[in-house]
Image: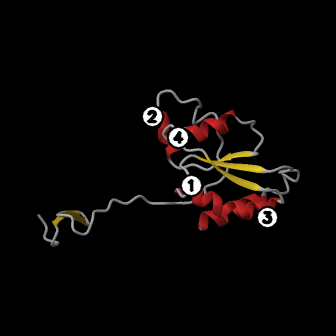
Amino acid sequence: MRFLLLFLLSITNGVTFLQDYPTRPVRMVEPFGAGGGPDVVARAISPKLSQLWGQPVTVENHPGKGSTEAPALVAKSPPDGYTLLVNTSAQAYSAALVKTLLYDPLKDFIPVAPLTSQPYVLVAGKSSEHYLCGRAHCSGKGKAR
């Protein structure tokens, strides 16, 4: 939520420079599909941006090709700020994993604002034989091995 507030604050501070933007609807494209993290974030901020900008801000889901279809669509769009990409760190590692990208993750995009910060965690089912306890490996009953 902190990043959302910083994002909205950065946009309001830039309003004096962008008095004529936007003059038509803005598209936010996300690469993972409805209900995924980027979709939830985009749908949370799009009404606020619509209210702030006085223009509709729509969210479009474009999953596919290992989350590279949406960035390819945005990279081919006119560079006018009316098609925005809401993405994750997949943007950074896609170049290393996918050899035939239709875009350059470093050259075809410019950062606008961070939206969230989300840690990744590793979990096991409670009935799992083994799990991690801090730095020590533990058995299911909490005894260090």
Dot placed on the residue nearer the N-terminal end, 2 or 1: 1
The residue to which callout 4 is attached is 64
Which picture quadrant has residue 5?
bottom right
Label 1 neighbour load within 10 Å: few <14, some 14-19, many 20+: some
Q: Earlier in the sequence, mark 3 or mark 1?
A: 1
Q: Which residue is mark 3?
A: 51
Q: Quick check: 89 above or below 95?
A: below
Q: CA distance from mark 3 to mark 1?
A: 23 Å
Q: Amino acid at mark 2?
A: Ala
In the image, residue 53 above or below residue 64:
below
**Relative image position of residue 121 (x, y in whole percent):** 37, 60
Q: Do the CB atoms of the residues marked 2 and 4 lie less than 8 Å apart? A: no
Q: Quadrant of residue 35?
A: bottom right
Give the distance between the C-alpha atoms of the residues marked 2 and 3, in whole angstroms.
Answer: 38 Å
- Do labels 2 and 3 touch, CB within 8 Å? no
Q: Secondary structure at mark 3?
A: helix
Q: Residue at x 41, y 58 (%)?
A: 120
Q: Amino acid at mark 1?
A: Ala
CA distance for labels 3 and 4: 31 Å
Q: Which residue is mark 1?
A: 34
Which secondary structure, mark 2? helix
Q: Residue furthest front?
A: 34
N-term-proximal mark, 2 vs 4: 4
Circle 4: residue type: Gly
Distance in Å between CA atoms under marks 2 and 1: 26 Å
